[in-house]
Image (cartoon, rainbow, N blue to C red):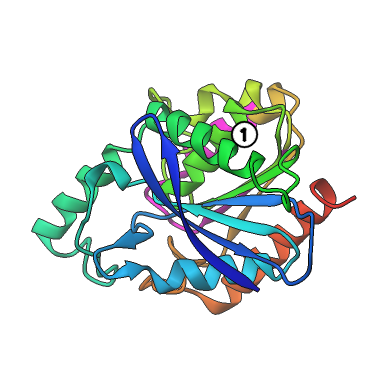
Amino acid sequence: MRREDISVATDDGACPTLVVRPDGDGPWTPVILFMDAGGVCSTRGVRPAMVEMAERLAGTGHVAVVPEMYHRHGDYEPFDMARAFADEDERGRLMGMIGSVTPETLAVDLDGVLAALDAMPDVDATRIGTTGYCMGGRLSLLAAADHPDRVVGAASFHGGGIGADAPGSPLHRVADIAGRVYVAAAENDPTFPEEQAEALEAALSAAGVDHRMETYPARHGFAVPDSPSFDADAAERHWRALAELFGATLSD
């Protein structure tokens, strides 16, 4: 695999982006991996957990693309995910940065990422997959709604608020999704309670979206290696689900 750290031009400035290619010559189809709350590129460089996940994804035969959705904050100190929610000051900093990632900023960043992918001769960006974790689960589904002509498969893992009846929620955008959707929730997850799961399931079904929703016997954050609630068995199950999703939608 080949790793490249690039700078993607957007209307809101440069977006640092991690790109990992499979071995070989391509062309490859891309999968955009939307980060969890911990971010991608801090003052200490690219977060090892994101590199690990991008490399695992590239190993399935797709170009992994991981944009830094916090780039509007400039250089920021990294979050220790083991204490970020327990420390009052760190929680406030983290929640403020999460709140700054809106459907509008996502749309701007996606325009830049798609333009960058279109300019890569070894990438076939006519079909794109997306996956996201925690806050990134929301972004993955919104990206599918923003670009139904390109996103053919979208996954959300322990996504927060994805079934909320609130502005900016994917719940109100599912009718715009044309690709296949996979949603994996965590057990007893206050960020995605049962009533939200029921609302999202009903909306996806009513819109005729090809989808599957499952609940893993794990805690919120189960798929991200540096999460304090990382669960190796659930993470492996998530990789199998992604291979199935993108094998069906991105492979010839």
Query: Where residue 150 sits: x, y (%)?
Result: 70, 33
Which residue appears at 33% of the width and 37% of the height?
Answer: 13
Which residue appears at 70% of the width and 22% of the height?
Answer: 207
Range of magenta residues: 180-203
Determine the image quadrant of residue 234. bottom right
Image quadrant occupied by the N terminus: bottom right
Q: Residues within 10 Å of mark 1 (few under 14, many from 20)?
A: many
The answer to if 181 sits in the magenta stretch is yes
Q: Amino acid at mark 1?
A: Ala
* 64 and 191: which is toward the camera: 64
Determine the image quadrant of residue 64. bottom right
- Residue hosting label 1: 144
Query: Where residue 197 sits: x, y (%)?
Result: 54, 40
Marker count (numbered) = 1
The answer to if 110 sits in the magenta stretch is no
Residue 203 seen: yes
* 79 and 17: which is toward the camera: 17
Residue 156 seen: no
Query: Where residue 123 sits: x, y (%)?
Result: 72, 50
Query: Where residue 185 sits: x, y (%)?
Result: 54, 53
**With 106 as the anchor, is 184 left or right in this view?**
right
Of all residues shown, which one is farthest toward the bottom?
232
Which residue appears at 69% of the width and 43% of the height?
Answer: 128
